[in-house]
Amino acid sequence: MKKVLCYCHVIVAVMMISCERFLDEKMLKSLTVPTTIQDLEALMKATGKINISVMPSLLEMGADDYVLSESGFNSLTEFERLNYGWKADMDYQLINVANEWSKSYEIVLIANTVLEYLPKVEGTENDKNRLRGEALFLRSWCFYNLAQVYCPIYIPDSDNSSLGIPLRVHSDLNVGSVRATVGETYAQIVSDLTEATELLSKSEIHVTRPNRTAGLALLARVYLAMSDYDNALRFSREALQTKDDLMDYNTIKVDDRMPFERFNKEVLYHSTTAFMQILNPTISYVNPELIDLYEDGDLRRRAFITPAKDGYFTFKGSYDGTISGSHFVGLTTAELYLILAEALVGANKVKEGVDVLNDLLKKRWDKNSFVPLSIHDKDEALKRVFDERRKELVFRGVRWTDIRRLNLDSRFAKALTRTLAGETFTLPPKDPRFVYLIPQDVIHFSGITQNQR
C-alpha cells in the first residue's frame, strides 16, 4: 500500500498547480507503480483523499442559504469576500486552487490510475469489475461537481456547446488538457455512470465506497441537473427500490448540538467539501429567508438550525456529524425521495409526486401535528417540492445547481441579493457569474480558456 500511495502522492504534488506541469523523464522512471490488485484496492480506500474535505466549497459559497455579519465578513480572505459579493474578477489564491480545483482532479487521477492498471494486474474478474465500477463512479462524481461551478448549466434541447471542463480520462500528465463542451461533459458523466452501475457491488458496503445504489442515486442527481425528468424518475425510483431508509426525526434528539451521526442510515455515499472559513458556523449564519420557510411542527428547523448571538441562527445539521466550514455533500435516500417527487410532478403525475413528498415529510414533522399535503395544481406542487428541497438539503451542495437550473424557467427564476454594511450585491438570473472563474494558475500553466465575464 505504501508504494502505491507514494506513487499517487508524487503525481498529485505536481497536479496541485496544474494538470499540465511537465514531468522530468527521470522522475517518471523513478515512480513506483501499482503491480497487484491489492495496490489498486488500497488506492480506492484512501478516504482522506477521496471522501473527506475534497469537493469544491464553491458548491455552497455562492448560494443563498447563508448570510454574514459585517465583522464576520471582515475576518475573511479577499477570495472569500469577493465571492460573497459575486464580484466579476475574483482573486484566486493558491490555497483556493487546491480546494476548488486540484483536489477533485487528484481523485480523477486516482480513478484513471486504477482504470489503466486493472488490465495489467492479476485478480478475479469480480474484483476487477467492482474496482472498475468504483473508479468510473469517482471520476463521474468529480466531473459532475466541477461542472456545477465551472460550467454553464445544461440546457435541454440545445447543443450545449459552451465550454465545459477538461475531461481527463488518462493518468499521463504529459497530455495537455482541453476544455470539452458542456454537452460533452455531461455525456462523459452519464457514460461513466451508466457503465459503473452495471459493475458496482449490489451489496451494502461502507458508504465511503460506492455501490450500485449510490451509482443510481448519482445518475438521478445528474439527470435532474440536466432537467431530464424521465431519467431522473427512472433512476431515483430504481435506487429507492434497493434502499429507501429514512430516519424518523421524532426518534432523534433534534435539539442536540449535533443531532446526526456520521454514516447514518440515510447516507448512500459520503463526501464533504474542502474547509472554507466563510462557511464556518462561527461566522456564517442561516439566511432568515430560509428559516421562515420552516413551518410549526417541522422538526428540521430544530435539527438543522440553532440560535446564535445577536439574533442570528447557525447550521448544525450536517450528516457528517460535525460542525465546521466543511459540509456533507454526499448522496442520501432523502434526496432520492425529493428527486422522485419532482420528476413525477414534472411528468404531470402530480398526485403520485405529492404522495412521495408526504412519505418523506411524515418522517420530518412532529407526529402529533403532521397533516399530509393535498396539492392538485402542477405549478403549486413544483413550488412546494422546490421549497422542500431547500429545507431538506440545506448546505448539501445542491442549492447552487437548483438555482441555476430553475433560472431557465421564468416561473421559478430568482435574483440573488446580499446586503452588507449598506451595500447591496445582486446576481440576476442567467448572469455569467453563475459560472465561476477557473483559478488563474490553472489558466496560466494549462493554457485553457477562462470563463467569460
Image (cartoon, grey):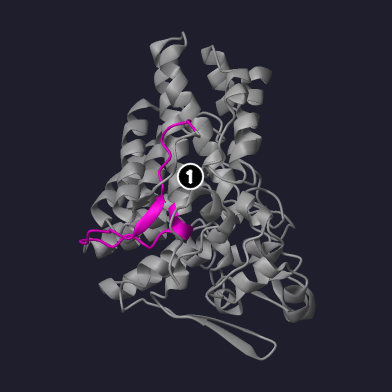
Where, quadrant-wise, is the N terminus in this rendering? top right
Where, quadrant-wise, is the C terminus in this rendering? bottom left
Q: Where is residue 33 in the image (x, y as percent from the top left)?
A: 57, 18
Q: From what the image shows, is residue 49 above or below residue 57?
A: above
Give 353 or 47, whichever is nearer the viewer. Answer: 47
Residue in view at x 44 percent, y 63 percent: 451
Q: Where is residue 268 in the image (x, y as percent from the top left)?
A: 50, 40
**Residue 101 visible within the image:** yes
Furthest-front residue in view? 25
Q: Position of residue 295 (x, y in %)?
A: 54, 74
Q: Going by the image, does 45 lie left or right of 404?
A: right
Q: From what the image shows, is residue 17 above or below residue 425?
A: above
Q: Position of residue 394 (x, y in %)?
A: 55, 62
Q: How many labels does the image show?
A: 1
Magenta stretch: give its range: 147-172
Furthest-bottom residue in view? 422
Magenta stretch holds residue 383: no
Give 412 or 380, whichever is nearer the viewer. Answer: 412
Q: Going by the image, does 41 lie left or right of 52?
A: left
Look at mark 1 in the image and give the residue it sits on.
Answer: 142
Q: From what the image shows, is residue 206 above or below residue 177?
A: above
Residue in view at x 33 percent, y 55 percent: 182
Residue in view at x 42 percent, y 72 percent: 432
Magenta stretch holds residue 167: yes
**Circle 1 sits in a helix, a strand or a loop, which is it?**
helix
The amino acid on which the numbered mark 1 sits, given as a three-letter code, is Cys
